[in-house]
């Protein structure tokens, strides 16, 4: 199936590593002109050169901390200067602080609201006008399976990220008539640095080894393994394409069967 992404301008945030990098890789391999952002220049440069080697397409990297609105304003104006606008936004974030409710401070909550909610509002508000002008756009929000089933030691994700589902539905209704779709991805366990962090945290809370926790987590995933970042990329690439024109306002679970709720 030809996804028709060649030449489209795709901005993937928080993409120097992990899931964001996997998404950027698939989009670049599909021929999109990819811009990645993250906080750290050195990691970003490394990622850009890896992506260029892997995909042989146009890739740019801009430093932007998602918790700073001014950084996102600069990021979008840099992309507009380069390409005139963003066709595809894949919004991904850094992971929130781990912790149960009683582990977290007020400051942790404020930081998480910036990282997991306000950054989505800011970046969407910044890229949407050009999409509206062009009459075409794709807004894709990477969230977490915690929207469907909580993880007791990641309360910030369980709570703050839920608002993205409200944002997605609101945008789908408001911008759908203008040729723009908005959808969310809710991934389960994907093998990245963050997944390692969670394993180490659970192991130390329970006083067992990381391997033991991993075995337990994997046993609960019907397909019997963690996901790969590129597997999120394949879904994002499909949602970004014209083939997915009729998918709008959906929150899609991609978790190997982890969440056992029916809907
Ligand atoms: P990761 O730690 O491997 O990569 C995170 C990326 O975000 C890195 O490129 C990092 O530089 C960047 N980043 C961190 N803070 C940032 C900030 N303030 N501004 C800009 N960039 C920033 O994480 P991952 O596993 O790829 O996860 C991506 C997102 O998906 C996270 O929000 C995570 O909580 C969520 N998630 C991950 C999993 C999983 O199993 N890996 C499952 C569900 C949800």
Image (cartoon, rainbow, N blue to C red):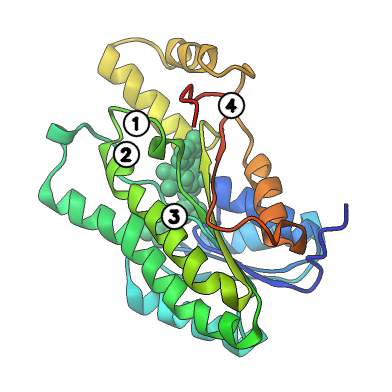
The residues tagged by marks 2 and 4 sit, at their Cα atoms, a distance apart of 20 Å
> What label does residue 226 carry, if any?
4
The residues tagged by marks 2 and 3 sit, at their Cα atoms, a distance apart of 15 Å
Residue 175: tell me if it is visible. yes
For marks 2 and 3, give the one nearer the viewer: 2
Q: Position of residue 188 (x, y in %)?
A: 51, 33
The residue located at (48%, 13%) in the rendering is 211
Q: Secondary structure at mark 3?
A: loop
Callout 2 touching callout 1 (CB < 8 Å): yes
Closer to the N terminus: mark 4 or mark 1? 1
Q: Write down the residue under mark 2.
A: 158
Q: Write down the residue under mark 3.
A: 93
Q: Write down the residue under mark 1.
A: 150
The residue located at (43%, 17%) in the rendering is 210
Closer to the N terminus: mark 2 or mark 1? 1
Question: How many C-alpha atoms fall within 10 Å of the one at disc 4: few (<14), some, or many (≥20)?
Answer: some
């Amino acid at each position: 199936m030809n996804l028709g992404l060649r030449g489209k301008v795709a901005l993937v945030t928080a993409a120097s590593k992990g899931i964001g990098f996997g998404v950027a890789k698939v989009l670049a391999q599909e021929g999109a002109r990819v811009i990645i952002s993250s906080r750290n220049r050195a990691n970003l440069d490394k990622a850009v050169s890896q992506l260029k080697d892997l995909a042989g397409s146009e890739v740019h990297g801009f430093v932007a901390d998602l918790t700073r609105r001014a950084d996102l304003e600069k990021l979008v104006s840099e992309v507009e200067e380069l390409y005139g606008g963003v066709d595809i936004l894949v919004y991904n974030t850094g992971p929130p602080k781990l912790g149960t409710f009683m582990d977290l401070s007020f400051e942790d909550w404020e930081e998480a609201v910036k990282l997991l909610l306000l950054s989505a509002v800011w970046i969407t508000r910044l890229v949407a006008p050009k999409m509206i002008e062009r009459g075409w756009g794709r807004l894709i929000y990477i969230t977490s399976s915690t929207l469907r089933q909580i993880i007791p030691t990641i309360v910030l994700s369980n709570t703050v990220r839920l608002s993205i589902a409200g944002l997605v539905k609101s945008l789908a209704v408001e911008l759908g008539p203008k040729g723009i779709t908005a959808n969310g991805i809710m991934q389960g366990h994907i093998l990245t640095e963050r997944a390692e962090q969670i394993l180490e945290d659970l192991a130390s809370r329970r006083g067992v080894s990381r391997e033991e926790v991993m075995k337990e987590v994997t046993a609960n995933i019907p397909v019997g393994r963690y996901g790969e970042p590129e597997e999120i990329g394949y879904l994002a690439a499909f949602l970004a394409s014209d083939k997915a024109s009729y998918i709008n306002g959906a929150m899609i679970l991609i978790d190997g069967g982890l969440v056992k709720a029916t809907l």
